[in-house]
Image (spheres, grey):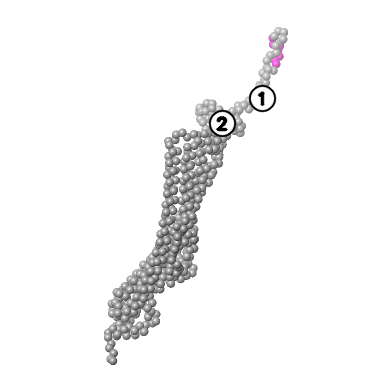
Amino acid sequence: MKAVFTPTLIRWAVAGAVLLALPAAAQTTSPSQPPAGSLVTTQSGGWTLQRAVDYGLQNNLTVRQNQLSADLDEADLRQSRAALLPSANLSGSQSWNFGTSLDPLTNDFITQTIRSNNFSASSQVTLFSGFQLRNTIKQNQLSYEASRNDITKARNDLSLNIASAFLQLVLADELVKSNSLRVNSDEQQIERTRKLLKAGAVAESNLLDSQAQLASDQLNVITAQNQRDLARLQLMQLMNLDPATTDFQIEVPVLGDPDDESEVRMDVNDTYQTAQSLLPEVKSADLRVRSAQYGQEIARGGYYPRLTFGAGIFTGYSTARSSFIPTGEFTRTYIPVLDSVTNQPAGTLALLNVQPKYDVKPTAFNSQIKDNLGKQLQINLTIPILNGLQARTNVQRSQIAVKQAELRAEQTRLTLRQSIQQAYADAVASQRKFVAAKRQVEALTTSYRNAEIRFNNGLLNGTEFNISKNNLSAAESSMIQAKYEFIFRQKVLEFYQGKPVSL
């Protein structure tokens, strides 16, 4: 029987000869890139997730601001405790009075220049104020504890954000590698197509379609690189690391595929109960409710009388105060002696009295300080009767503040429950999405291999071949994204269960 050579058989024969002449690397019919997860390798010398989190916790400004807020609340707590102690004050003054003025010590009007000093020491202690002081201490103690929990919440939020940014960077890096493999596959395909075109096995349109696909995939590489750079910048910003750092590299962990694990199953209510007993934002909200309740007691203390006890000591000095200083001399007074018979002066004198002489001089400073010393004890009772309804208004405001704090605590719990429900639903969905995408990749890989053989032999035009390749690329990208979305949601669920964030 005579052999018949049709144009189709001739193209197949030429294509086979050309393919046999190509290097082994160019004959591969494997997919343009391996499945998700196989690109993840461990690098040395880079930033691990734990190191990035530790650095961020030390340098992030939000965490440091929360620390300063807690320091302020601690200062308020110390001040409220010190308010129970007596107050003590020392004071002193010096003044000059000219012309007719009142002597500050004698209350006499004197027309002369007077220099005076006044010194005093006083102390006062509150004996009763409607328990406001003690309730203020309790309120500030709760506020300080809430602020400490706010610091923990800020640290937890930062850890989760850094973990999310870290995984986003790993995802972006893997997408860059995946798109780079596609470009490499396109270049090999173009080389094969050129040789087939020279042999007359394929049309020129096949080469043009391959070149167009190369340009599209090169654009995808640039886009993926831009996304990687943005992800790196976001991670560095969360860490408060100088963006000018050019040698910033992460250590990529080895992460398993979602289908390697059993299907996500979790009791949302149990996780919620665990989370609300552990998470600092719930504790902080409850502490602020109790703090607002003590604020209400403080406001009610305005209805009660206020009893204080005070004591003081004071003295002073004035240049108008003078003293009589003995000179050491005396004034003697004599009277004539009368004759007892005639009752006439007998010619002799008798000493009547002796008066010492004095100089008038200003009283010495030390003497006046001692002589003018005075002391005081005082008990003061203040009974509020009408103060413009301030006490009643303060009580009403404090009652509203309690209701607001209770609503915020309820909102915190509601947000927590919804976040857990959403994270669980997202984890389940992303795991299922990965499994479905993986099956899709496997099916499209087989379809792509067949399309590639047909394209190389001129049995498939470039448009249909590129559609097959792009479908495979889209499925692989979807599978990679589903993988990292599942990993992050899984870490969020572990965090709600009290486990540390780690990869």
Decide if residue 167 is in sight here: no
Image quadrant where residue 1 sits:
bottom left
**Residue under the point 37% across and 78% down:** 29
**Relative to residue 370, is residue 255 drawn left or right?**
left
Q: What residue is at 52 percent from the left and 34 percent from the top?
A: 381
**Residue at which label 1 appears:** 329
Query: Could you say which disc has been placed on residue 16 in the image?
Result: none
Residue picked out by circle 2: 318
**Foreground disc of the pair 1, 2:** 2
Secondary structure mostly taken by the magenta-highlighted segment of the chain: strand
Helix, strand or loop status at disc 2? strand
User: Which residue is farthest top?
Assistant: 342
Q: Is residue 182 above or below residue 284?
A: below
In magenta, the rendered stretch is 344-350
Comparing 498 with 391, the one in front is 498
Specify the amino acid type for callout 2.
Answer: Ser
Residue 125: where, in percent of width, then height?
A: 55, 38
Label 2, residues with CA under 10 Å away: few <14, some 14-19, many ≥20: many
Give the residue drawn at x 35%, y 73%. Answer: 444
